[in-house]
Amino acid sequence: MMLAALFGLLWLDHAAQQWTTDYRPGGIGAIGLSILLILIMPIAVAELAALFAAEKVRPRRGIAGAGCILFVVHAFLTQFAWFKPISTSTLALLVVFIMLATALLWGIMKRTQEAIHAMAGTVLASLYLGGLAWFIIALRVKQAWHADGTIKFAGSTMTILMMLLVVKFTDIGAYFGGRSLGRHKLIPWLSPGKTWEGLICGIITASFMGALCAPRVSQLVWWKAMIFGGVIGGIGQLGDLLESMMKRDAEVKDSGSLVPGFGGILDIIDSPLLAAPFAYILFSLF
């Protein structure tokens, strides 16, 4: 069901760009992807807030959820020429707005207790979820040119699908590699099930998946795609370990129970979220 919904939204994302070519040269990108992130961000905020509560940090869920959605909308707007001159200043203003909105809420309630915790937690939740999600949309709509005016890179639905496949096939390769070859624990105090052998197998699997996706990604040759796959696959594992650290601090096994067999939304998106900014940088270099 998750895969059907994901591929359906990615199809909508691709189709919507073709449908909107009359309104903008090349069409409007990231419509379906933005819808997906806008739908899941409030749920992810609620799960992250539950983890933070273990340390008595209680972000304002409404403000953090709105902040995450605004990050997604901001990244979506960066594809339009009229928005580009103000994109940097509005992004900085958004971060300040989230903090000030939380402080204003405390002022309206005439409270000072835990105000610092609330502001810090709300900003952290917004940046961790919305800030990283910004890079997913920004990568989808990204366009870069060579000095001679020829296209260097153009983001597409396949670019995002490649990143997701690379990250998830790292998990698959690490799982089977760890079960068959695993001998040396990666970080036993944090994630006792992970091994160095599993990680290496996962990165190799991700590299080959990157090479398979290369023909359908703009201006990406196979050997660059293999580098991309290995790097992003490894970083995706760091995203999983980062969430494991938060869950251990909160003394819970999963971030939620919304998705049977997987846990919560955070358990699904933790790796792609952390991989997104590095994918954005790598595609900028390639």
Image (tube, rainbow, N blue to C red):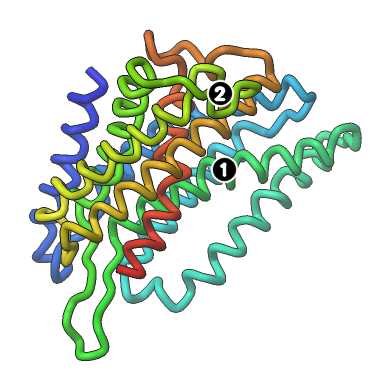
Q: Position of residue 235 (x, y in %)?
A: 45, 44
- Residue found at x 65% / y 22%: 189
Looking at the picture, tell me which residue is in the foreground, 172 or 269.
172
Task: Establish if 262 lies above or below 94.
Answer: above
Circle 1 residue: 128
Q: Position of residue 248 (x, y in %)?
A: 65, 20
Splitting the image into 4 quarters, where does residue 11 fall?
Answer: top left
Instruction: Give the amino acid type for the residue marked by disc 2 in the picture.
Output: Glu
Label 2 environment density (alpha carbons within 10 Å; few <14, some 14–19, many ≥20):
many
Q: Is residue 183 visible?
A: yes
Looking at the picture, tell me which residue is in the foreground, 138 or 87.
138
Q: Position of residue 239 (x, y in %)?
A: 50, 37
Mark 2 or mark 1: which comes first in sequence?
2
- Residue found at x 41% / y 49%: 276
Residue 47 circle label: 2
Say which quadrant the N terminus sits in: top left
Q: Is residue 73 visible?
A: no
Splitting the image into 4 quarters, where does residue 117 fall?
Answer: top right
Give the SS element for disc 1. helix
Task: Establish if 241 lies above or below 98.
Answer: above
Give the SS element for disc 2. helix
Q: Position of residue 73 (x, y in %)?
A: 41, 53
Marks 2 and 1 close (CB-CB < 8 Å): no
- Residue found at x 30% / y 55%: 227
Residue 207 circle label: none
Instruction: Give the amino acid type for the residue marked by disc 1 in the picture.
Output: Tyr
- Residue found at x 44% / y 58%: 74
Label 1 environment density (alpha carbons within 10 Å; few <14, some 14–19, many ≥20):
some
Say which quadrant the C terminus sits in: bottom left
Looking at the picture, tell me which residue is in the foreground, 256 or 89.
256
